[in-house]
Amino acid sequence: MNPGNKLQSRTAAAKRGRGLLRSLWTDRRAVSATEFAMILPFMLVLLIGMEEVTGALNQDRKISRISNSITDLIAQAQTIDTNDMDAIFDLGGKILAPYPDDNLKVLLASVTFDEDGKPTVDWSYDSKHGKPWAKGSKPPVTLPDTVAIPNSSIVVGQASLTYVPTFAGIFTEYFDRASSIDLSDTYYLRPRLTDTVTCDDC
């Protein structure tokens, strides 16, 4: 066999060996996989947090819209009854959609201020068909000074909801987090067509 051919074969084999070592040395695919495995838990926690914050903000905004809407509808009436208010309460679930309204609580009330600006409940009615504020009693909420005008009345609308995050219970053994959030809002409006909105069967 020609010695020159042997030398060329050895040189070619050495080049192939060096090329194989170089390709193994510069291969970064395993590094990318390792980086992905390290960052994946952080990305999942971030994604869950964004979903829960967005859900809470959306529902809180809808709760404010519900309390505003029902108060505005009652303030436009001169007299109201429980059947009318039950129909108005049904609007709350439609406004809250697509979120469930199982925990939604809505309350309407009329409050009159005497000559000294002291408030007294005229009537109250809630979405559970109850009368939570006793007639003639002091309202169990703190009313703003701006609405306490002597010899006047207001309509009070209140909506509340217990928001339970979609992923409630996950990571609680590692992170201190609430399993639910209480959302509520209250609106005060003056009657538009009468001094006091009346309700005979409340």
Image (spheres, rainbow, N blue to C red):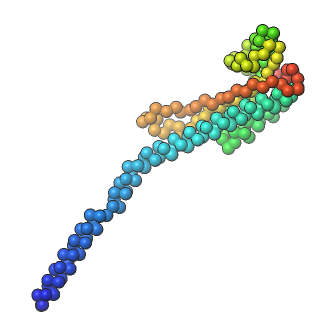
Q: Is residue 19 left or right of residue 111?
A: left
Nearer to the camera, 107 or 185: 185
| Residue 81 visible in the shown view | no
**Going 71% across and 35% down the picture, which residue do you hit?**
65
**Going 63% across and 31% down the picture, which residue do you hit?**
183
Image quadrant where residue 11 sits = bottom left
Nearer to the camera, 133 or 14: 14
Q: Quadrant of the C terminus?
A: top right
Compared with 44, 133 (above or below) is above
Nearer to the camera, 129 or 146: 146
Compared with 70, 130 (above or below) is above
Q: Is residue 146 left or right of residue 58?
A: right
Image quadrant where residue 190 sits = top right
**Going 83% across and 14% down the picture, which residue do you hit?**
151
Image quadrant where residue 181 sits = top right
Q: For the view shown, which residue lies furthest in the top direction?
A: 116
**Going 16% across and 80% down the picture, which residue do you hit?**
10
Where residue 199 appears, x then y in whole percent?
A: 85, 22
Where residue 97 appears, x then y in whole percent?
A: 69, 42
Where residue 106 appears, x then y in whole percent?
A: 72, 29
| Residue 164 visible in the shown view | yes
Where residue 59 appears, x then y in whole percent?
A: 64, 37
Q: For the view shown, which residue lies furthest in the front direction?
A: 146
Q: Is residue 186 left or right of residue 167?
A: right
